[in-house]
Amino acid sequence: MDVRPATPADRSAIRAVHKAAFGRAHEADIAEALREAGDERISLVASEGDVLVGHVVLSEGRLGDAPVLCLGPIGVVPDRRHSGIGAALMRAALAEAAGSDAGLVVLVGHPAYYPRFGFERARLLGLESEWDVDEPWMALRLPRYDPALRGLVLFPAAFGRRRSSWATRVFSAWRGRTRV
């Protein structure tokens, strides 16, 4: 299995990965909208031979005037879950994020999965989410982290707007299982 930067030739396969991973098109639509809007900062694929089996994207959000990286979607095709692909994508994406100008990576995700990569509850850092979620709202401090950064994190428009039910619905579907 190889992890590499996504290319334009990967677009349809990336869509297929997310549709298979989540059983619907919503996350694939978000990944496409991030790319089309120019909001992608890091987009990596995992491949086995010529077949894409996973994808992760980090896009630029804002915390006041400061950039933050918003992780997601991340997806692995169902028949390759629990084989280390999601972890390999996470490690590679976070290594790239550490070299960025952002001080944080934020996400709404399964609280049993992401702490192994250093994520913690974002509210403990004084960060507020656009969505009505608590436990799945997480952040990872990067080398450029400044503890003075506090407040509402704004995700790219592809995720929907403030206080929508997107994150609540997604987390409800994840409750009790790990998707990657």
Image: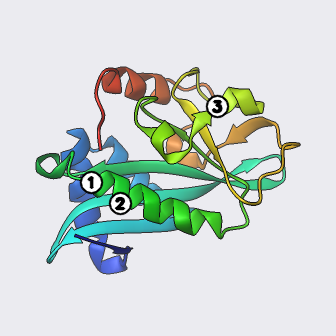
Tags 3 and 1 touching, CB below 8 Å: no
Quarter of the figure that contains the N terminus: bottom left
**First in residue order: circle 3 vs circle 1:** 1
Please state the horizontal and vertical placement of residue 33, each as a whole percent of the image: 45, 56
Q: Which mark is residue 10?
A: none
- For this orientation, the residue located farthest to the left is 79
Is the residue marked by circle 1 packed among few (<14), some (14-19), or many (20+) residues within 10 Å?
Answer: few
Tags 1 and 2 touching, CB below 8 Å: yes
How far apart are the alpha carbons under marks 3 and 1? 31 Å
Q: Secondary structure at mark 2?
A: helix
**First in residue order: circle 3 vs circle 2:** 2
Quarter of the figure that contains the C terminus: top left
**177 sits left or right of 133 in the view:** left
**106 sits left or right of 109 in the view:** right
Q: Secondary structure at mark 3?
A: loop
Is the residue marked by circle 3 packed among few (<14), some (14-19), or many (20+) residues within 10 Å?
Answer: some
Task: Name which residue lies at 84% across and 43% down.
Answer: 147
Please state the horizontal and vertical placement of residue 117, each as a whole percent of the image: 49, 47
Q: Which residue is mark 1?
A: 84
Disc 2 residue type?
A: Ala
Mark 3 against mark 2, which lies toward the viewer? Answer: 2
Task: Name which residue lies at 40% across and 67% down.
Answer: 44
Q: Which mark is residue 88?
A: 2
Task: Name which residue lies at 57% across and 30% down.
Answer: 137
Task: Name which residue lies at 37% across and 20% down.
Answer: 172
**61 sits left or right of 17 in the view:** right
Disc 3 residue type?
A: Glu
Number of numbered markers:
3
